[in-house]
Amino acid sequence: MIKGRVTKIESKDYYILSDAGEIVRCSLPGKFKNQFNKGKGKQYKLDIVAVGDFVTVNLNKDGTGSIAKIEERKNQLSRKALRLKGGSVRGERLEQVVASNIDNIFIVSSIVGPKINNKVIDRILVAAESSKINCNIIINKIDLDKSSKTEYWKKFYEAVGYKVFCTSALEKIGISELHTYLTGKVNLFWGASGVGKSSVLNVLFPHLSLKTGRISDYSSKGQHTTVTSIMELVGGKTFVVDTPGIREIDPFGIQKIDLAHYFLDFVPYIDNCKFNTCTHFHEPGCAVIDAVENDEISIERYESYINLLDTIEDGMNF
Ligand code: GDP
Ligand code: ZN
């Protein structure tokens, strides 16, 4: 029996990094699925085992293994699963676990080429906050910034309460500060295509075997078991979780009434609304709307909030 951590899931193969530093290909016995199905409530999860999970494995003679025990997760970053054919019926929501037991999430954006998208950043911030995972922002390609937009967005998100790293993978700016910050931690990187996530990772960890362009290997499979995140030990106790197959992270399992709690800049105002059921949309006596009108909360953040509110269906029970 050995202990280890799930680093990659590919179809029905679970790749475990053992405490001794070896990769063992494992299967998941059917009993887990049975137990799992019995325990399900209103929430339908796709992933019994996720990248980042700590597991105990029984070794087979041929060097492969069989997962015997899955430890409880400290946290997990989930997203609303893409609708699968026949996989979801009315009233159900499918949760896909992107990764578990994470210390830091880094949202990688580029200031230009493609232009920074604060709506996308805000969606992931909500997913991170609702999972209680520390989230940070990387603004990359600052070498291309000709109009000090970087400074604007850095101040913007710092005012909300996030740490913002400004980098250029090309000119190796801001990399050592980032490296210091994430050392010894489990760090998940997410970024829209083309922002330079792979470039930043490659400059941070030149020996990393995650490569640009590997995404095509994964997307060709067309199953929900397609690889979406990969964990790699990059030295000492530092891990990187890359998410090449994750194009979007739509927050999972949030109710309208709770959404504002995941906007850190709204939190100081929420309790002052006239109604404790306030969704800060049109209700009279809303302290959040007042704060927007008084420029205490930015209109950009409020628009992100309204957009997200709109995606949450009424009466969803999680
Ligand atoms: P990914 O899709 O987010 O992994 O992006 P890549 O790392 O593949 O980078 C996309 C493109 O942006 C490539 O052509 C990179 O050379 C370029 N790129 C990445 N980082 C920087 C940067 O800091 N500055 C500039 N000017 N270009 C960059
Ligand atoms: Zn309100």
Image: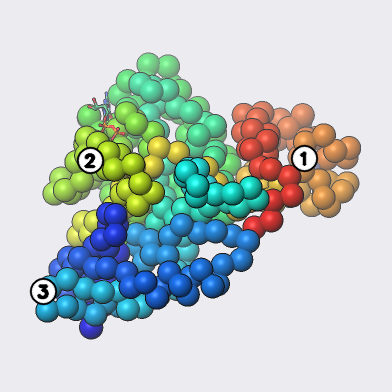
Tell me the residue at 59%/49% (across/down).
89
Q: Does dot 3 land on a helix, a strand or a loop?
A: loop
Circle 1: residue type: His
Q: Is mark 2 on a helix, strand or loop?
A: helix
Q: Which mark is residue 217?
A: 2
Question: Pointer 1: what residue?
Answer: 280
Residue 188's disc is none
- Residue situated in front as seen by the camera: 115 or 62: 62
Q: Position of residue 127 (x, y in %)?
A: 53, 48
Compared with 256, 143 (above or below) is above
In the image, 222 versus 26, the foreground residue is: 222
Q: Which of marks 3 and 2 is nearer the N terminus?
A: 3
- The residue pinned by badge 3 equals 62
Indicate the amino acid at tag 3: Asp
Say left or right for 100 vs 122: left
Q: How far apart are labels 1 and 3 at the CA level?
A: 59 Å
Residue furthest to the front in view is: 86
